[in-house]
Image (cartoon, rainbow, N blue to C red):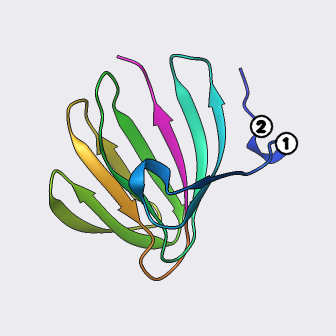
């Protein structure tokens, strides 16, 4: 199966999971697994949330920002892959520039 994000419209998600600003995404969701192209503009964030029954993998395509995972902060940037296992918490913040990323949320 091929998912062509270039043929999808951006969806606006204000305050996504309690985050700041508007999170933009293009998403494929079959009810069990999600694949997503995400865009966080500078100053926007995905709210701090816990993965229950799922995990998440995020690959940063462009930009940099901050990851908060299980209370610890890390700087993140282009080319890095982030992993949040089931039962753990995280947030992604575009601190000074936009972050473009791919994300996969498989069901467990």
Residue 50, compared with residue 18, is above or below; it is: above
Tell which residue pokes out farthest to the right in this image: 7
Give the residue at mark 1: 7
Between 25 and 77, the one lying in front of the other is 25
Using the numbered discs, state the Cα–Cα distance from disc 2 to disc 1 in whole angstroms.
6 Å
- Which residue: 49% across, 51% down? 16
Is 44 included in the stretch rendered in magenta? no
| Neighbourhood count class around disc 2 (C-alpha, 10 Å): few under 14, some 14–19, many 20 upward | few
Viewport quadrant of the N terminus: top right
Residue 5 placement, left or right of 41: right
- Which residue: 42% across, 48% down? 17
- Which residue: 25% across, 60% down? 68
Label disc, if present, on residue 26 of the rendered structure? none
Viewport quadrant of the C terminus: top left
Q: Are marks 2 and 1 in contact (CB under 8 Å)?
A: yes
Badge count? 2
Residue 37 placement, left or right of 8: left
Which residues are drawn in magenta? 100-108
Residue 52, compared with residue 50, is above or below; it is: above
| Neighbourhood count class around disc 1 (C-alpha, 10 Å): few under 14, some 14–19, many 20 upward | few
Choose top left, top right, bottom left or bottom right for residue 24: bottom right
Between 34 and 57, the one lying in front of the other is 34
- Which residue: 77% across, 37% down? 4
Q: Position of residue 63 (x, y in %)?
A: 51, 72
Tell which residue pokes out farthest to the left in this image: 71
- Magenta span: helix, strand or loop, mainly? strand
Residue 2, compared with residue 31, is above or below; it is: below
Q: Position of residue 43 (x, y in %)?
A: 48, 76
Q: Position of residue 65 (x, y in %)?
A: 40, 72
Give the residue at mark 2: 4
Report helix, strand or loop for mark 2: loop
């Amino acid at each position: 199966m091929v998912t062509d994000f270039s043929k999808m419209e951006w969806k606006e998600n204000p305050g996504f999971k309690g985050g700041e600003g508007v999170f933009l995404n293009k998403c494929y969701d079959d009810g069990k697994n999600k694949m997503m192209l995400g865009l966080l503009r500078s100053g926007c964030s995905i709210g701090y949330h816990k993965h229950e029954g799922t995990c998440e993998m995020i690959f940063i395509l462009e930009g940099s920002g901050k990851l908060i995972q299980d209370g610890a902060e890390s700087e993140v940037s282009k080319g890095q892959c982030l992993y949040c296992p089931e039962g753990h918490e995280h947030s992604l913040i575009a601190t000074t520039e936009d972050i473009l990323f791919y994300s996969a949320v498989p069901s467990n």
